[in-house]
Image (spheres, rainbow, N blue to C red):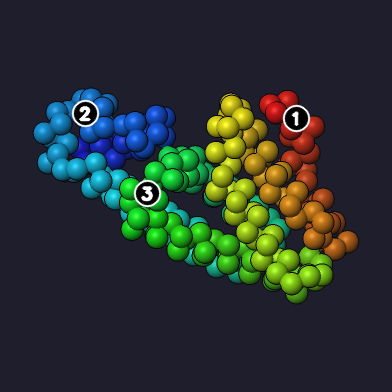
Amino acid sequence: MKTKDRILAAAVSLFNQYGLPNVGLQQIADECGISVGNLAYHFQYKEDLIRTIVDNINVELSSVVGAEIEFPLLIDFDNQLSKYYDLINQFAFFFLDVIELERSFPTIHQQRVKYINMMIDQIYQWLNKNVEKEIFKPAIHAHQHANSAYAIWMIISFWLTQKKILSTNGVDADEEKFKIVVWNQLLPEFTDVGLMEYEALILPQLRDVELLAGLNR
């Protein structure tokens, strides 16, 4: 692995573990086994390093958020949730240190807002497509599905934050628990046909975890 890539990987790992404000260039250099001078050859300031990492995050976000769901089945959305789950764990600091990024890096924050809006819109469009397919019920009040999309975004984006607040440790079933919380937001939206599809395709993957969901509360 090239030195620059080693620096980026070490920085992400340390930011995830200790938090963005608590990691300096010396600590990153020590993690890589190089001098601060060598690190500064690639990234003179911590801000330069953070911006490069966020550029990489934006590439990952773009591939997930920008993906068109050609066949908007429930399983497609479930697969999308897996991608989001992997992303928030790979770059945990980006989702945990929200205020620090907003205060110290306003340009990065504006990029984040752009992707947030794209993500909410993607979920909203998926909901509408499934209303057309009679998988979900039509809205009974204005902005119902827009609000559902917003609520799902909040669950995805702040999943790690609530774990930190409640001091819950990650377990093998954590991804499934994450999905259960999201899918539970959608249960009241299902038509009878949609509920049958959910029970046939999604629920079998989650049923065992549902029985254990309270163990780490």
Q: In the visual, does 195 lie left or right of 159? A: right
Tag 3 and tag 2, C-beta contact below 8 Å: no
Q: Position of residue 52 (x, y in %)?
A: 28, 50
Q: Secondary structure under badge 2?
A: helix
Relative to the observer, which residue lies in front, 129 or 47? 47
Q: Residue at x 42, y 54 (%)?
A: 60
Crowding at mark 1 (Cα within 10 Å: few <14, some 14-19, many 20+): few
Could you tell me how far apart the alpha carbons at marks 2 and 1 are, in whole angstroms?
42 Å
Could you tell me how far apart the alpha carbons at marks 1 and 3 are, in whole angstroms?
36 Å
Q: In the visual, does 209 lie left or right of 41? A: right
Relative to the observer, which residue lies in front, 82 or 98? 98
Q: Type of residue at label 3?
A: Arg
Could you tell me how far apart the alpha carbons at marks 3 and 2 are, in whole angstroms?
23 Å
Q: In the visual, does 145 lie left or right of 25? A: right
Q: Position of residue 125 (x, y in %)?
A: 63, 69
Q: Which residue is mark 2?
A: 26
Tag 1 and tag 3, C-beta contact below 8 Å: no
Dot 2 or dot 1, earlier in sequence: 2
On residue 214, which mark appears? Answer: 1
Q: Which residue is mark 3?
A: 103
